[in-house]
Image (cartoon, grey):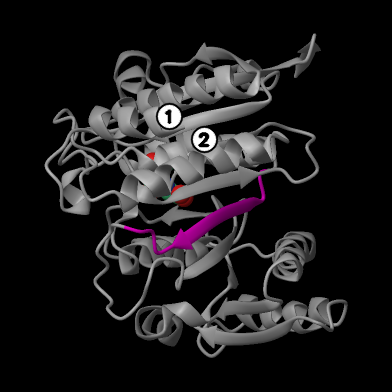
Amino acid sequence: MTEKQNTVTYKIANVPGDGIGKEVVPEGLRVLDKVSSKFGIDFDFTDYDWSCETYAKTGAMMPEDGIDQLRPNDAIFLGAVGFPGVPDHVSLWGLLIPIRRHFDQYVNLRPVRLLPGIEAPVHGYNPGDIDMYVVRENVEGEYSEMGGRIFEGTDRETVVQETVFTRQGVDRIQRFAFDLAMTRSKKLTSATKSNGIIYTMPYWDERFAENGKDYPEVETDQYHIDILTVHFVARPDTFDVVVGSNLFGDILSDLGPGVTGTIGVAPSANINPEGKHPSMFEPVHGSAPDIAGKGIANPIGQIWSASMMLDHLGQPEAGAAILEAVQNVLKDPTSPKTPDMGGKYKTEDVGKAIAEAI
Ligand code: GGG
């Protein structure tokens, strides 16, 4: 960040990635351009064309010094990763996961909200009735490269995958969730599976009880992940902050937007809370190869991620202005909507309407 005569400049790494990432990121940039002129904020973007196409050409999703190239930025604005032709684990472990790990972005914050103008598969709720945060542990847990294969190709073929829970990793994500709950309705739910997963999940529960002692005002509950998915559908309005391991948080933060109508609007922030490294902002959805190239992807997940980026950079008014514009556009029955929201409009129509509304 640099400051010159009342104007702040942020260095942003722009990584559209694959599929619809390339279509929704320009709409995020359109909206950022609009807030830039309105709020006196400047962005110094550097574009990185790291993607499955790059992998096909070079054998790597990003160059060897990719992390060092990203390091001087204040934030990373990412679209989506993955495309047919490159195995999903190759694209994810070649780009998204190394960024999260190298920059210790151990919090993946994913809001779930019932927005106006979007029909949800669950009925009887008004906009705002469903309003929660899924706090996903983002650098360890089930997403671990510890393990391997032996006796490959024989009838003794054996595959082992280790889950890694560290005291530091579990405590810091749970405490982040408790702190967030303290700023909201002081209610926190923990996703567990300590009946079936015999070592890591009882440990998760033990630390949850221990960490909770420092937050006596926070009302807590915990559910096994299987029944928690049922409660997400049956009574989504009763959750406020939900904390889960890497895998459980990933699943719940797709389910939540599914319950509120469309994953196309869901944003996420991969945060290094200490600010030692750049944080990364990306929609929850992936590259959606089935609709890529048609220009009909919903840009709201990307645009809302831009709002979260501004909040994180210390520009909450600009962040709030984006979210307000999104809601105002959605509220208006005559405004453009993409097919996932029941409309017939294109990605750029929605992006332009939101930029206009700011
Ligand atoms: N928006 C980034 C993206 O492509 N997400 C899809 C995905 O599968 N992400 C895996 C993860 O969040 O761990």
Q: Residue at x 37, y 84 (%)?
A: 230
Numbered disc 2: secondary structure: helix
260, above or below 218, in the image: above
In front: 116, or 254?
116
Neighbour tally class for label 1: few under 14, some 14-19, many 20 plus, Cα within 10 Å: many
**Residue 345 placement (x, y as % from top left):** 16, 37
Task: Residue at 56% x, 63% y: name it.
Answer: 133
Q: Would residue 234 be seen by someone viewing this image from the given angle?
A: yes
User: Is 106 a magenta residue?
Assistant: yes
Image coordinates for residue 313, horizontal then vertical, percent: 70, 33
Task: Specify the quadrant that holds the N terminus.
Answer: top right
Report x, y in % for residue 33. 49, 19
* Quadrant in which residue 178 is drawn: bottom right
Residue sitting nearer the eye, 176 or 17: 176
Query: Above or below — where is 139 with respect to 312?
Result: below
Specify few, some or many for label 2: CA neighbours under 10 Å numbering under 14, 14-19, or 20 or more: many
Tell me if 80 is positioned left or right of 334 in this view.
right
Q: Is residue 271 left or right of residue 355?
A: right
For mark 1, what is the residue? 28
Tag 2–tag 1 contact (CB < 8 Å)? yes
Residue found at the far top of this picture: 4
Q: Residue 144 falls in which quadrant of the image?
A: bottom right
Is 12 above or below relative to 77?
A: above
Taking 323 as reference, is 349 left or right?
left
Q: Nearer the viewer, residue 215 or 149?
A: 215
Q: Amino acid at mark 2?
A: Ala
Q: Residue at x 77, y 65 (%)?
A: 179
Kindly identify which numbered label has been placed on residue 306: 2
Which one is in front, 213 or 119? Answer: 119
At horizontal 68% and vertical 34% (from top left) the residue drawn is 315
Is 149 contained in the magenta span? no
Disc nearer the start of the sequence (2/1): 1
